[in-house]
Image (spheres, grey):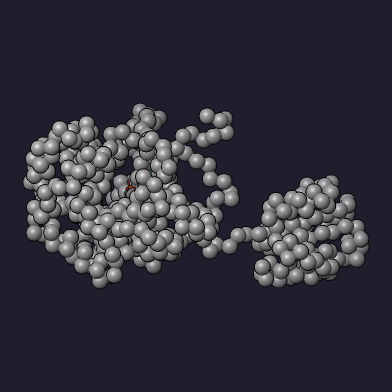
Amino acid sequence: MAKSAPLPGTSDIFPGEVGAWRFLEETARGVFNCYNYGELRTPIFEATEVFQRGLGDETEVVQKEMYTFEDRGGRSVTLRPEGTAGVMRALLNTDVLNGVEQRVFYIGPMFRGERPAAGRRRQFHQIGAENVGRIAPELDAEAIAMLLGLLEKLGISGSTLKLNTRGVAADRPAAAAALKEYFSKHIDILCEDCRKRLQGNVWRILDCKVESCREIIANVPDYAGMFSAESREYFQKVCRHLDWLGIKYEIDPFLVRGLDYYVHTVFEITHPGLGAQNAIAGGGRYELLLPGESKPVIGVGFAAGMERLLMVREALNLPANGDMEENRCVFVAALGEAAEEFKVKFTAELRNQGIAAAAEIAGKSLKAQMRAANRVNAACAVIVGEEELAGNTAVLRDLTGGEQKQVALNELIGEIKKLINKQ
Ligand code: HAM
């Protein structure tokens, strides 16, 4: 590993790339605002039990992927592998357990010790949203509509919405027994992991990617048909609301999602522009139990992977920064001692007026200064030498068009503003 490389599965995001991230963040804030969601910022690490209880001991994330360490005082803490559990912990401070709705969103880094690959990072970033405290099919449909609204505003077309129901806890034993019975008959064809899953969490077999397993999975019994009438009706209502909203979806009985807190509706958005890790976003309705609580927090929500959103936008040839304007600066070039003083003062003046400005350090040739202007992609350059200063003027050069003119110093800022606004 080169000395300058960050750890595997992590990345540095350089200033030139940050615009693309800010575009995602600002677009999400705009969309979520229209649905009355407020931003919640929770800590990057939590007590380990928050995730163990919240996501379920049996989930792969909890079993294999958490960054867990001992904090001062011997407390076990974990870098958040996802946002939902921490958000629920924070919302215990509100009235969500008494059915008072909270709408929150979050943007930030998550950590999973996965094997790094294209689109699979150890530190990755999510934009997520949670509607917490109440249960109703229309809220599930609305969360999906909001996610799709975000993708549309990001210019991401061609994605597929997959939808399924997980029923509720009481629905599962009978359905799981039917699945177990079915898979047991094909145990000799199942991969080693699935054989283990047959003893533990049989649902996880449904999203196994191994080819031979897929053939068996394709013919599983209709387990959702065994769920209670209420659960089936709940799912039908979600579908009906999506129909009302004109949202296209594929019902995918193999979609179970990796986290154990889901009940009823689960969904995932995939995009062909991504490789093997083709999920841009996933979510669903959940009942999440936190340590020391006897009642789960209920809600519906989703999270989209920001790295994957950027990959899809790149695959679709969309401009990295979206429609956000690049902040091009004014370059102040000086020749000679007296001009140096002007340069320092005028650069400060521009910045005080909210205009981005740049300059070279003293003593460089005009050529070197213009090279520096190029490097910072300046919109225009102000050039002053002894002669200009004596006449109370400066040269203003448009670095896009190439024209230049002599401008009186007292008109300089006005002329610069005109030029920048024109560009
Ligand atoms: P998740 O499906 O585990 O769900 O993650 C959501 C999204 O985060 C994925 O679709 C993917 O785009 C991105 N993602 C996950 N792991 C990685 C990784 N290692 N590298 C890059 N991107 C990744 C959750 O996290 C749930 N908390 C979503 C949720 C919110 N459900 C209800 N509310």
Residue 235 rendering spot, x and y as whole percentages: 17, 60
Q: Residue at x 21, y 40 (%)?
A: 213
Task: Classify 146 as above or below 340.
Answer: below
Query: In the image, 249: left or right of 314?
Result: left
Indicate the quadrant containing the C terminus: top left, top right, bottom left or bottom right: bottom right
Is residue 288 among what the camera can see?
A: no
**Going 46% across and 34% down the picture, which residue do you hit?**
8
Residue 318 appears in the picture as rendered = yes
* Residue at horizontal 78 percent and vertical 66 percent from the top: 403
Foreground: 161 or 170? 161
Name the spot of residue 382 as percent of width and height, x first.
Answer: 79, 61
Residue 199 position by quadrant? top left
| Residue placed most toward the observer, 409 or 234 | 234
Q: Position of residue 33 (x, y in %)?
A: 40, 64
Q: Residue at x 31, y 36 (%)?
A: 48
Q: In the visual, does 237 lie left or right of 407?
A: left
138 over 210 or under it: above or below: below
Q: Is residue 97 left or right of residue 402?
A: left
Q: Quadrant of residue 422?
A: bottom right
142 lies above or below 50: below
Query: Count of labels shown?
Result: 0
Report whether 74 appears left or right of 373: left
Image location of residue 258, percent across then percent down: 27, 44
- Name the residue nearer the viewer: 249 or 106: 249
Q: Is residue 187 above or below residue 418?
A: above
